[in-house]
Image (cartoon, grey):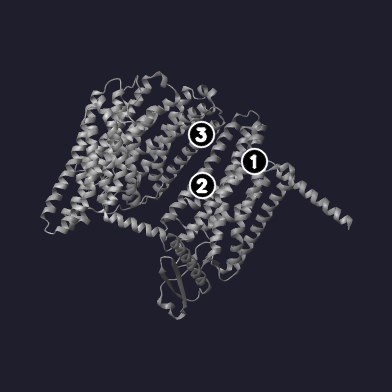
Amino acid sequence: MSRGNYTEVTEFILLGLTSRPELQVAFFVLFLGFYVVTVIGNVGMIVLIKIDSRLHTPMYFFLLSLSVLDLCFSTNVTPKMLENFLSEKKTISYAGCLVQCYIVIAVVLTEHCMLAVMAYDRYVAICNPLLYSSKMSKSVCVRLIIIPYVYGFLLSVMETLRTYNLSFCDANEINHFYCADPPLIKLACSDTYSKELSMYIVAGYSNVQSLLIILTSYVFIFVAVLRSRSAEGRRKAFSTCGSHLTVVSVFYGTLLCMHLRRPTEESVEQGKMVGVFYTTVIPMLNPMIYGLRNKDVKGALRKCYFFIALVHVEVYILAVMAFDRYMAICNPLLYDSKMSRSVCVRLISVPYAYGFSVSLICTLWTYGLYFCGNIEINHFYCADPPLIKIACGGVHIKEYTMIVIAGINFTYSLSVVLISYTLIVVAVLRMHSADGKKKAISTCGSHLTAVTMFYGTLIFMYLRRPTEESVEQGKMVAVFYTTVIPMLNPMIYSLRNKDVKEAVNKAIIKGSTIEYMQDYFEMQYIADCILRMAATMYKRELMTVVKELIVLNPAKMKIKISLTLVPEQMAEVNITYVTEFILKGITDRPELQVPCFVVFLVIYLVTVLGNFGLITLIRIDVQLHTPMYYFLSHLAFVDLCYSSAITPKMMVNFVVEYNTIPFHACAIQLGCFLTFMITECFLLASMAYDRYVAICRPLHYSTLMSKRVCTQLVAVPYIYSFLVALFHTIITFRLTYCGPNVINHFYCDDLPLLALSCSDTHMKEILIFAFAGFDMICSSSIVLTSYFFIIAAILRIRSTQGRRKAISTCGSHMVAVTVFYGTLIFMYLQPKSNHSLDTDKMASVFYTVVIPMLNPLIYSLRNKEVKDASKKALGKGCETLKTLKLRK
C-alpha cells in the first residue's frame, strides 16, 4: 500500500506554556524554584526515612516509594520545560518524546496503585492494629511495592507502543510543554480510534480500581474510628490519614480533569494549565504534606505562610494598579488594546503566583529553623521577626535573606509605582484643560492614598533587623496594618470614586426589583409552556409567535402572548419543530414484519411468564427466602420492566404503517430503559458480593447479609439508577431537534437521538462515556474482585464435592454476567466516530429482548433449589385442581 507523498516526522516542537518572549525568563525562574524545592523536599524525605530508625515502618516505606515516583516524574518533565524557556529551538526528538511519554504514563499509573496501597496500609493499621505487624510484614510490603511498579511500567509500554504505531506525517507542533497522549493524538494523520479507546480503558480502569480500594479502605477506617470511644484515639486515627487524604484529593482531582476527556483543542489548552499543577506543583507539595505532621508547627507555619504570601501579592497588585492608571492617562487611545482582559488576567496571576511561591520558600526556611526552648511568640499572629527571636540558632542567613527579599520586592514594586506616577504627573501637566487635569488626578487619588498607607506601615515594619524594641513597636504598627488598612481600602475606593458610588446605588435599586424579575421569569416559563402545547396541538400548521414584554413600572411586569396560525406561509420557513419521532425499527422489508412480530411476541410471552413466575415462586416458597433469591427476584423484576418498556412498542410497529412515538413518550421510554439497565448492572454486582460472602465467609453469612443489608444493597442501585437516568433524559431532551425525526433504531436510545440533534452534543457524548464507563467499570470491578476471592477460596477446598457445590452456586450468575456485560461493552464504550447504529440494533435485540428471556431460564434450569420449588408448586397446583374438581 502506498504511504503517500509526505515526510515522516523525526522531531517535535513543544509550544510550551506561552509564546510571549517577555514571560519566558519569569517562568524560568518560577519553575526553577518549584523544581529545586521538589528535589530538596523529596530527596530530603528519602534520606530522612533511610537514616531515622523510627521511620522504618510500612507507612514510611510506602512514602519513600511515593517520593521516588514524584522525583522521577518532576525530573522527567521540568528540566526540558526549563530548557525550552531559554532556547529558541524548542524541539524534542521523536525517540525523546516517546521516552518522556512512556515515563509519564508509567509513573502516573504506578502512583495510582501506590496511593491505593497506602490507603490499604492505613486500613490495616486502624482496623486491625493487633495484626498490623504480621499483615504488613516486610515481604508483604515489598510485594505491595513491586506490583504497582510492574503494572504501571508494563501498561506504559503497551500505551507507548500504540502511540509509536501512529503516523505523524506533517504537523509536528505539540500544543503542550511535555509529550503527552492527548496532544500527540491531535497530530496523528492515521486512525487513532484504537489508541483513544485504549487510553480511555486504561485511564478509566486505573482510576476506578485504585479509587475503589481507597474509598473502601476509608469506609472501613471511618467505621472503625466512629466505634472508638476515646476522643484522643479518634483524633490520632484521623491524624494518621490526613496527609494521605490530602494527597489523594489533589492527585485525583487534577488527574480526572486532565485525562478523562476526549482530546479536543479546548481540552489540550486547559490540560496545559492543569498539567503545570500536576507535573510540577504536586511533586513539590507531597513531601511538605507528609512532612508537616506536627499540629502546632503546622498551625503557626500556615498563618505565617498566608500572611507573607498575601503581603507580597498586595505589594505587586498596587504596582499593577499604578501601571493601569499610567496607561489610562498617558495612552488613553491604546488603553482598550493594551489593557485587554487577557493582559489584566496575566497581570493579576503573576503577583499571586510569585507571592505564594516566595512565601512558600520563606515559610519552609522558617520551618527549617530549630525551636528548642521558648515557644512564646511575642506577637498577636505568626510572623517572621518574632519567630526568628525564639529560634535556637541558624537565624543569621534567614534574617538577611528576609531583608533582601523584602528590599527587592519593595524596591521593584515602588519603582513601578513611582515611575508610573512620574509619567502620569508629566502627562497631567501637559494638559491645557483644568477640567481634564482635575479628572485625571481624581482617578489616581484613591490609589495614591492606599499606596501611601500601605508602604508607610510596611517599610516601618520590615526594613529593619528584628530586635526586642522593633518587635514591640511592630506590634502596634501591625494592628494598623493587618486590621485597619483592610477596612479602609474599600472605603477609600468607594467614597472617593464616582463610578463605584453609582454602581452601589444601581445595585440597591436592582435589589428592590429582584422579586419582580422572578415573577417575570415565572411568567416567561408559563408562556413557553403554552407555546409548546400549541405547537403540539397544531403540529400540521405553522405558528407565528409574538412575545411582548410590557414594562409598566419597576413594580409591575407582564407578558403578552399572541398566537397566529398561518398555514399558507409554511413554505417560506426553514425550521421544523419536532413533536414526534419515527422509529425505523429492525427492518423495513414488508415480508419480514409479520414473522418478526410472531417471533418477538413469543419471546416476550416467555419473558413475562419466566420472570413473573420466578418472582411468584420466590415469594411463595419459604425455602427460597434467602439473600440470593431475594436479589434474584429483583433481577427478574428489572428484566420484566425494561423488556416491557421496549418490546410492546416494537411489536406494535411491526403491524402498523406509521411507526411514530410522541416526544414525551420517547423521553419516558429512554428514562425507563436507562433506569432498569443501570439497576441491573449494580444488582449483578450485589449478587456477586453475596456469592463471595456465602463461599468465603460462610460462618458470618447470616450476619453480613442480614435483611437490612440486603434491602440497602437493592435500594441503592434503584435510587442511583433513577437519578442518573433522570439526569441523562433531561439533558437529551433539552437538545434541539429541528430537522429529521427518523430514529434509526427500534426504541428511543441516547446514541441514535444524538445523531438527530442539530445542537452541540459534545457535552452529552462526554457524559455518556463518563457515566457508562464509571457504571460498567465500578460494577464489573466488584464482580471481578468477588470472583477472584471466590476462586481463591474454592482452590483451597480439598473436597471435590465441596468445590463442585461452590462452583454450582456461582454458575448461573457467571453466565448472566458474561452475557450482560459482553453486549453492554459492545454497545456503549465506542466513540461516536466509529459507532455503527445498525450494528447496535442487532446487539440491542439480543440485549433488550433475549437476555430478559434467558435470565429466568439460566437461573431455573441450572439451579436445583428452583427446580425443586417449581416441582413442589406444580404439585400443589395439581392437588388444588383435583380438590376443586372433586368439590364440583
Residue 735 visible? The answer is no
Camera-side mark, 1 or 2: 1
Nearer to us in this view, 484 or 684: 484
The amino acid pointed to by label 2 is Asp
The amino acid pointed to by label 3 is Ser
Nearer to us in this view, 78 or 489: 489
Residue 85 placement (x, y as % from top left): 22, 41
Instruction: Return the residue at label 3.
Output: 217
Instruction: Return the residue at label 2.
Output: 775
Circle 3 sits in a helix, a strand or a loop, which is it?
helix
Q: CA distance from mark 3 to mark 1?
A: 22 Å
Q: Earlier in the sequence, mark 2 or mark 3?
A: 3
* 32 left or right, relative to 866: left
Circle 1 sits in a helix, a strand or a loop, which is it?
helix
Q: Earlier in the sequence, mark 1 or mark 2?
A: 1
Image quarter in which the C terminus is found: bottom right
* 153 left or right, relative to 527: left
Q: Is the residue 64 above or below the residue 534 in the image?
A: above
